[in-house]
């Protein structure tokens, strides 16, 4: 196994007078803490390349915010918990305040906009968005409701089904209920199942189930990450993704990308995604006929609209052996790591990463007067 190293430069020069000051939130309390670090490194480089002044703010696993020191150094591979603690001034339009008396001597900037590079609970689920709303700070991405709905995979499926969009057949299991009956589930969903937490990403706590014993083990593993578990039919076919960004004329869908997991992995798990550089082959664009690609892009825009997404999202699909598409998940802060499909799909669609992050920042800033 090999790991992907972060090596992005942080400029020391002061911002130009017209530069936008972007607070980049990363780390956080969720199990996707390390993935957030990788995404933030890529976003930071793109924001700097686009001419923005970036203030990296690392959130440690206890939820404390640390204004990371600037300097000619690699982007931090971990949140520096020795760095000054900060908070946002309530109603202070982005002014950072010292988080502790010992940090009061530090000269802290005012943020024009916040880019939450946070994955999972306490970052992508509407929680930090509510804080930013209360503090009067413009921010990139889904609002409180959109983040909460898409983070909860049960409610995502309910709304998509109500709107007539195809989703993978599933059953819900809650903590405290008797373990699901294998025979009954396999009769209704099929003999090959997949189990995952209802409110987590990056394949953490997820796994296949092919019999009663593996089902029980998978449910217990998923319950370690939340109170609700989805048990789904395992789709035999292709795994595809499509990015969506907002515009004044409506959602724009990227080209479709495909993930082909290496044979040594049972599915596209955390190791295949982030730890093994040979864990998967990423094809952008995917090798699809024109009609299928068009259909997936339409479904991506529809899902974006139905779930009240804003600014950006990645819509994940399965395409079964008969060519039937299923919406799998919707991610309102898709991965921006060096191996993530979202930035690659938009690059292949003619929007390079510095241009993409600038569009997102500008969308957030444009909302600010009306929101205030």
Image: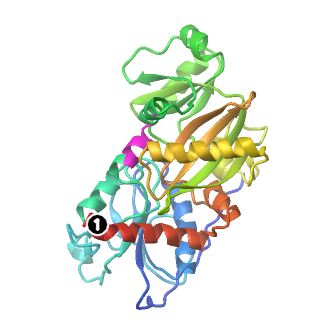
Tell me the residue at 64%/43% (across/down): 296
Asked whether residue 285 is in view, the answer is yes
Percent coordinates x, y for residue 82 in the rendering? 38, 70
- The kind of secondary structure the magenta stretch mainly shows is helix
User: Residue 97 appears at what percent x and percent y?
Assistant: 25, 74
* Residue at 64% from the left image edge and 52% from the top image edge: 274
Q: Nearer the viewer, residue 198 or 243?
A: 243
Seen in the picture, residue 211 relative to 59 is either above or below; the reply is: above
| Magenta stretch in the rendered image | 146-153
Quadrant for the C terminus, please.
bottom left
Q: Is residue 171 above or below residue 97?
A: above
Residue in the foreground of this view, choosing between 328 and 81: 328
Q: Is residue 71 left or right of residue 123?
A: right
Residue under pointer 1: 370
Helix, strand or loop under label 1: helix
**Image quarter for residue 346?**
bottom right
Residue 150 highlighted magenta (yes or no)? yes
Reply above or below: 214 against 73: above
> Percent from the top left, x then y, of residue 205?
53, 36
The residue drawn where x is 38% and y is 24% is: 175
Above or below residue 48? Residue 324 is: above
The answer to whether residue 34 is left or right of residue 274 is left
Q: Nearer the viewer, residue 279 or 213?
A: 279
């Amino acid at each position: 196994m090999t790991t992907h190293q972060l090596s992005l430069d942080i400029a020391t020069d002061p911002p130009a007078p017209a530069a936008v000051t972007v607070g980049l939130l990363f780390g956080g309390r969720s199990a996707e803490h390390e993935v957030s670090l990788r995404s933030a490194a890529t976003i930071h480089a793109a924001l700097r390349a686009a001419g923005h002044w970036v203030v990296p703010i690392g959130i440690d696993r206890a939820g404390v915010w640390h204004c990371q020191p600037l300097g000619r150094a690699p982007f931090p591979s971990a949140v520096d918990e020795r760095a000054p603690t900060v908070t946002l001034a309530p109603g202070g339009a982005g002014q950072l305040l010292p988080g502790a008396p010992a940090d009061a001597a530090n000269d802290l900037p005012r943020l024009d906009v916040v880019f939450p590079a946070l994955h999972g609970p306490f970052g992508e689920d509407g929680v930090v968005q509510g804080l930013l709303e209360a503090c009067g700070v413009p921010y990139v991405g889904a609002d409180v409701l959109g983040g909460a709905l898409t983070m909860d995979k049960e409610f995502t499926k309910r709304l998509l089904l109500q709107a007539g969009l195809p989703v993978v057949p599933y059953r819900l299991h809650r903590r405290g209920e008797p373990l699901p009956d294998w025979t009954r589930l396999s009769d209704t969903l099929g003999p090959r199942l997949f189990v995952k937490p209802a409110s987590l990403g990056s394949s953490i706590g997820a796994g296949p189930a092919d019999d009663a014993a593996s089902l029980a083990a998978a449910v217990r593993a998923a319950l370690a990450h939340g109170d609700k578990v989805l048990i789904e039919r395992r789709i035999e076919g292709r795994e595809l993704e499509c990015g969506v960004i907002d515009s004044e004329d409506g959602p724009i869908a990227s080209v479709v990308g495909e993930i082909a997991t290496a044979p040594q992995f049972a599915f596209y798990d955390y190791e295949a995604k982030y730890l093994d550089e040979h864990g998967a082959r990423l094809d952008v664009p995917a090798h699809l006929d024109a009609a299928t690609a068009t259909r997936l892009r339409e479904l991506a825009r529809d899902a974006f609209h139905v779930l009240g997404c804003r600014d950006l999202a990645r819509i994940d699909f399965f395409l079964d052996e008969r060519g039937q598409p299923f919406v799998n998940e919707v991610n309102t802060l898709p991965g921006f790591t060096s191996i993530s499909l979202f930035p690659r799909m938009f690059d292949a669609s003619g929007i390079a990463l510095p241009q993409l992050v600038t569009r997102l920042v500008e969308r957030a800033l444009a909302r600010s007067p009306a929101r205030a």
